[in-house]
Image (cartoon, rainbow, N blue to C red):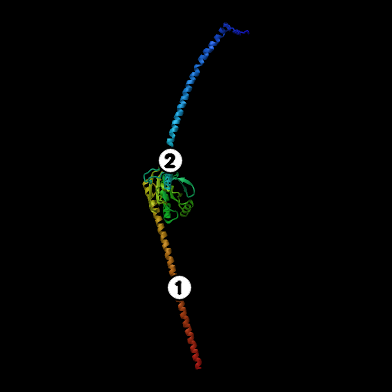
Amino acid sequence: MPVELRKRKAPTTPPEPPAKKQAKAPKAVPKAKAAAKEKPAPKEKAAPAAKANGASKAKQTATKAKAAEKPAEKPAEKEKPAAKAPTKKETAAAKKEAAAAAKPAAPAEKPAVGDVVDLEGFGGEVETNDGTKTTLKQLVDESKAGVVLFTYPQASTPGCTKQACLFRDSYEPLSAGGLAIYGLSTDSPKKNTTFKEKQKLPYALLCDPSATLIDATGLKKAPKGTTRGVFVVDKAGKVLAAEPGGPDATVNVVKKLVETMGSGDTAAVDEAAEKAEEAEQKEEAEEKKAEGSSDEKEEEGGGDGANGETKKGDDDDKEEEDDEEEEKKNGEKEDEEMEG
């Protein structure tokens, strides 16, 4: 029989010496303790992370809910284009309202006697006939007692010429108390300069083509034009006179004002007004006289023609008589010859 071989067990390795294990154990224990201490930190971090994840999930849920709600709001936004477009009338009305809102508000009432106006910006900027830019405030500041503005529709017309000349003739007595006198119209500087030089006016003429100052004084016609009148304001901006009137009436307003102010020579004003009236009457009389003399000349010319014709007729008669005498003489000669 064959011999069976038995395997021997491999010898086991001897265990490590216990001394070495005890020497390393003190180092391992602190490491294990440190690891034990460090391990809770990640766990604490994990908890906030979990919370953050939960919060983010909650936010995502909320956003999804909002997103789900948005489609319900969208139809309302889509309904806006369905609104009707504004018509042309509505657009024009909106433009008018915007323009009216942009424009400065016009004064509710015209300035009246006794009112105190703010001279700063009152009536805007105007121009003198020589081209100097100025304002009512500046004119008042330059005056001693205030400013007189007499308005007229158009330079060099009969009524305006009369008005300007009345203020010219009364200029010294009316301005003796410190009132500065100016004419005011919408005429151009060139036209007003011609008017001033021709009539020898001692005061400046103000040009207000846009009628801002005329409108502020309450003497503007609607929708366009200038009302003849007078506007007087003192140094404090108090309105002393503001009324329409004719050439004589405007001068009389200032005359009465000078009397109440206790300044100026009112007798001289009366005399100047009388002289102006006399001069006007004299001019009218001269015009009538000139017309009458021209008519007389025409009549005289016609009389000369008749006399000429009469004279001519007399000459013709004389010639006929001479012819008759010659014929008679010739007849007598013929009779004598026949008898002889």
Q: Give the distance between the C-alpha atoms of the residues marked 1 and 2, in whole angstroms.
A: 99 Å
Q: Amino acid at mark 2?
A: Lys
**x, y percentage for residue 327?**
48, 86
Visible in this render: residue 313? yes
Q: Is residue 7 above or below residue 40?
A: above
Report the front residue among 253 and 272.
253
Residue in view at x 46 percent, y 77 percent: 312
Badge 2 density bin: few <14, some 14–19, many ≥20, Cα 10 Å = few
**x, y percentage for residue 116?**
38, 43
Number of numbered tags placed on the structure image: 2
Visible in this render: residue 178? no
Mark 1 or mark 2, earlier in chain: 2
Q: Amino acid at mark 1?
A: Gly
In this rendering, which labeled residue sits more in front, label 1 or label 2? 2
Report the front residue among 157 and 335.
157
Residue that mark 1 sits on: 305
* Residue at the extreme front of the image, as rendered: 1
Q: Secondary structure at mark 2?
A: helix
Quarter holding the N terminus is: top right
Residue that mark 2 sits on: 80
Residue in view at x 50 percent, y 17 percent: 41
Residue in view at x 50 percent, y 19 percent: 42
Report the front residue among 219 and 21.
21
Badge 1 density bin: few <14, some 14–19, many ≥20, Cα 10 Å = few
**x, y percentage for residue 105?**
41, 44
**x, y percentage for residue 330?**
50, 87
- Give the quadrant of residue 4: top right
